[in-house]
């Protein structure tokens, strides 16, 4: 480590959406000294961050790539290394003969001129050992994710020998007492940070000597992520779904006898700091044809402060016989700004329009009509329930993408089960969610959940697949599916989630349908919407979304 870089401790505490004091990055002549941080220092969760090298040998660049990507195993962030063009993170080696190693924090990288680095390594060369690459690269990319100095975390327990620290840093760095207090000794207020318990083993904690403290407790020479690092960064940049992302009744019981109420407690791993938002959809139904098709997927009320678990339910009611079923869900952390918008209490809107904050939601036909009411048919014989959802003003500059999943059905027996849910008339300010049926089908009620996200969102794409895209509804077929190619290939295997948005099944036999995806790779996946036994499936479709 360079002589002018103090052996000080830095953080696994991340910037919270509060006003922050000046940065405590240790500065060098060309580094980010006294940087002021904004409220939005977090990158959006799932962000694909472009990283470009401004100089350096292939050997040095490859080492940085390797150790930087350690964070990707535990945080929903993707470092994409590019050879040219714009990049949020620009890496240099000994830039203008700068012998220090440093990085700007989080989204403050965006404030820096594109001609200048946002990260510098001042002492790497062809003889540097892997232990030093691991310690320094992992540490600096932690800063790039928004990490501040551990010793200035509100949870810090260091008892500084202030006279010794001030004297040593004056001798080594030429700092006066005020600068040493700002950079090393002073703590952040609790309201300014989100932090774990103080962790001396954190990769974000550099070595400092025992005689800098009154109790002789220095820090170890940390070279890899600690268990606290892994857990904490996972909470701040959580993966979309920490469980399998789906639940099947068959995992909890045998298909016979049928059971009306079915549930499972889903543990968030790692946990969230507050309850995330959930989007739910049915992906499997196995019900007896002798009674109405009544099924819904829902959760018990989630404590707003709880980020540990939730209870997922797949239920039926009355005389309906539920043999099996399945559900898919999405998790969105409370601070994920790309799936949030600005609320407004003054917007004037029609009485049938719901203003949503954030843009995830549910439409249940029972909020608009009773089960004995039937929507009028249009000229094509389609009957639809429609709800208009308004996005918070300023959320989108162009029509967003909207994913819609069926989450509850109450369909009359004796007529074929035909229902579909879709987003239509999507604009930058609103969209219509329609739940439709046709012919002699009777939809007593139905519900659909939805999520909207902006076009061009890094690492996210979605779409609709349907058997009607490649065959007519008749004759029926039990096996339906195909291959989906992503609009642009991912640089690693993404996570793909799908649920039912369309079904047309003969009511003379039990309703058995299962929608799922498999064979996922960086270029696409295979989808399936299948029936089994004697079920007659005329058509089926899924709405899918991929995160990578």
Image (cartoon, rainbow, N blue to C red):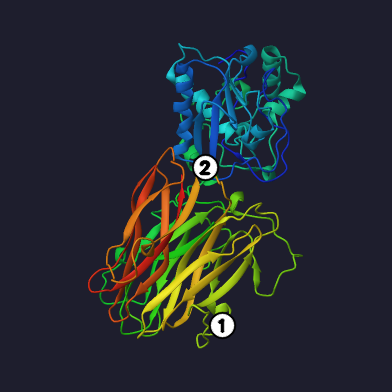
Q: Nearer the viewer, residue 314 or 213?
A: 314
Residue 258: quarter of image: bottom left
Crowding near the residue tagged with mark 1, few <14, some 14–19, many ≥20 C-alpha atoms within 10 Å = some
Q: For the view shown, which residue lies furthest in the front direction?
A: 379
Q: Is residue 142 visible?
A: yes
**Image quadrant for the N terminus?**
top right
Residue 232, numbered circle = 2
Q: Position of residue 303 (x, y in %)?
A: 55, 63
Total numbered circles: 2
Q: Is disc 2 in contact with disc 1, using a CB cutoff of under 8 Å?
A: no
Label 2 to label 1, Cα distance in Å?
46 Å
Tell whether 145 sits left or right of 537: right
Q: For the view shown, which residue lies furthest in the left direction?
A: 533
Secondary structure at badge 2 equals helix
Residue 218: quarter of image: top right
Q: Label 1 belongs to which residue?
A: 369
């Amino acid at each position: 480590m360079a002589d002018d870089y103090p052996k000080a401790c830095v953080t696994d505490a991340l910037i919270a959406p509060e006003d922050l004091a000046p940065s405590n990055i240790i500065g060098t002549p060309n580094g980010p000294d006294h940087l002021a941080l904004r409220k939005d220092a977090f990158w959006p969760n799932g962000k694909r961050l472009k990283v470009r090298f401004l100089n350096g040998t292939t050997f040095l660049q490859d080492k940085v790539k390797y150790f930087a990507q350690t964070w990707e195993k535990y945080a929903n962030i993707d470092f994409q290394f590019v050879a040219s063009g714009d990049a949020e993170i620009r890496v240099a080696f000994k830039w203008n003969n700068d012998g220090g190693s440093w990085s700007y924090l989080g989204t403050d990288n965006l404030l820096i001129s594109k001609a200048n680095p946002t990260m510098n390594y001042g002492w790497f060369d062809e003889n540097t050992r892997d232990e030093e690459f691991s310690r320094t690269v992992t540490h600096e990319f932690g800063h790039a994710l928004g990490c501040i100095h551990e010793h200035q975390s509100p949870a810090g327990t260091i008892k500084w020998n202030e006279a010794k620290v001030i004297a040593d840093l004056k001798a080594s760095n030429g700092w006066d007492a005020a600068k040493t207090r700002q950079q090393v000794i002073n703590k952040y207020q609790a309201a300014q940070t989100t932090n774990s318990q103080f962790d001396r083993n954190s990769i974000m904690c550099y070595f400092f000597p025992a005689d800098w403290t009154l109790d002789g407790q220095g820090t170890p020479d940390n070279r890899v992520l600690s268990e606290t690092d892994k857990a904490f960064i996972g909470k701040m940049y959580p993966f979309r779904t920490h469980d399998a992302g789906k639940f099947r009744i068959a995992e909890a019981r045998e298909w016979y006898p049928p059971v009306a109420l079915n549930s499972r407690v889903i543990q968030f791993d790692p946990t969230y700091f507050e309850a995330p938002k959930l989007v739910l959809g049915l992906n499997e139904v196995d019900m007896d044809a002798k009674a109405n098709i009544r099924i819904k997927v829902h959760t018990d009320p989630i404590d707003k402060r709880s980020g540990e678990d939730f209870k997922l339910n797949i239920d039926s009611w009355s005389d309906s016989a539920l043999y099996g079923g399945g559900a898919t869900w999405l998790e969105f952390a409370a601070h994920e700004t790309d799936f949030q918008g600005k609320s407004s209490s003054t917007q004037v809107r029609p009485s049938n329009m719901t203003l949503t904050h954030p843009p995830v939601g549910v439409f249940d036909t029972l909020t608009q009509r009773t089960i004995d009411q039937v929507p009028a048919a249009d000229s094509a014989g389609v009957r639809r329930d429609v709800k208009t959802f308004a996005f918070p003003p300023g959320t989108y500059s162009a029509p967003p993408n909207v994913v819609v999943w069926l989450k509850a059905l109450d369909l009359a027996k004796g007529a074929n089960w035909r229902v579909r849910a879709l987003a239509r008339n999507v604009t930058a300010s609103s969209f219509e969610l329609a739940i439709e049926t046709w012919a002699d089908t009777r939809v007593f009620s139905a519900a659909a959940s939805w999520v909207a996200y902006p076009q061009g969102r890094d690492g996210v794409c979605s779409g609709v697949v349907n058997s009607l895209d490649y065959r007519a509804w008749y004759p029926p077929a039990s096996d339906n599916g195909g291959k989906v190619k992503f609009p642009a290939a991912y640089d690693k295997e993404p996570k793909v989630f799908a649920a039912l948005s369309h079904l047309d099944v003969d009511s003379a036999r039990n309703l058995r349908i299962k929608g799922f995806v498999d064979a996922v790779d960086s270029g696409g996946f295979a989808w399936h919407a299948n029936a089994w036994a004697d079920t007659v499936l005329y058509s089926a479709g899924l709405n899918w979304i991929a995160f990578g």
